[in-house]
Amino acid sequence: MGLSVTVLGCDGSYPGPGGAGSGYLIRGGGATVWLDCGPGALAALQTHVGLDEVDAVVVSHEHPDHRSDLEGFSVACTYVVRRHGVPVHAPAGVREHGYHTGPPALAFCDLVDGSRFAVGAMAFRASRTDHDPHTLALRVEAEGRSLGYTADTGPEWSPLQLGPPVDLLLSEATYTAEHEGEAQHLSGRQAGRLAHDAGARRLLLTHLWPVTDRVALQAEAEAAFGAPVEMADPGRTYQV
């Protein structure tokens, strides 16, 4: 089956019309992991797997566009699918937002810079990015393949912090180059350059502002990366 990532939502900061915030379904090594839980991601998740099939959840940071649907998942686990102790790997700030407990549906595991953990035969490694609050990029390895996820970051972080070059880098690219420096995020140009310098074999862009010109962003990313660049599409599965 290999390692794959299915895009549940790829809108940056807020969901556009018919869109959803950051959310990805990672499958490989006999495990199913929900990575980031932005608004709308929970609904999309259920079109691909049942809530009882999620082996673990990973949340990159506590901004609502990456963790808000964790609350709905907790409610469903508590009252509907009757699951207890689902592992949630996340920075400590995420759990402070409060989730249904008693008995606890979610079992939080603190995620920090350098954290390593496994879900089934899927191995994870975390790296602190150039983004506040405490935000973790992830390297995922399974079945001889590697996926890098930048989460949210500014340009003062490099995918090299995740280790050797990855087969597929899932990188945020919030806006085009004309907006560089306006926030702790990457432009398409910056994402392409970072991926090129880190030796990523493929680049998949996500976390776009809904108003961003996708054609212009893709073009500037490809110019910097030096190769074709893929754009995240909700509902699509990408083999790593």
Image (cartoon, rainbow, N blue to C red):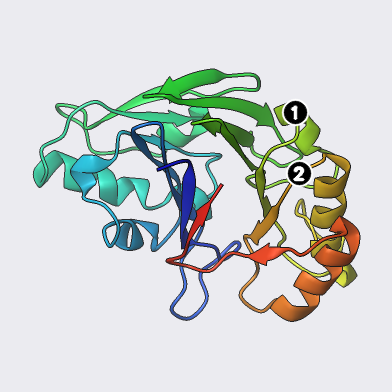
Q: Can residue 175 be seen in this view?
A: yes
Label 2, label 1: how many angstroms apart (C-alpha)?
9 Å
Please say if 108 is above or below 52. above
Tell me, yes or no, whether the two marked residues, 2 and 1, touch with CB atoms within 8 Å: no
- The location of residue 196, given as percent across then percent down, is 85, 48
The quarter of the rendered structure image containing the N terminus is top left
Mark 1, residue position: 164
Q: Give me the disc on residue 200.
A: 2
- The location of residue 128, given as percent across then percent down, is 69, 30
Amino acid type of the residue that numbered disc 2 sits on in the rendered structure: Ala
Horizontal side of residue 130 vs 135, given as left or right = right
Which quadrant holds residue 104? top left
Residue at position x 76%, y 29% in the image = 161
Residue at position x 48%, y 50% in the image = 5
**Helix, strand or loop under label 1:** loop
CA neighbours of label 2 inside 10 A, class few (<14), some (14 to 19), many (20+): many
Residue at position x 88%, y 52% in the image = 193
- The location of residue 109, given as percent across then percent down, is 42, 22
Amino acid type of the residue that numbered disc 1 sits on in the rendered structure: Pro
Horizontal side of residue 59 vs 113, given as left or right = left
Of pointers 2 and 1, the one earlier in the residue sequence: 1
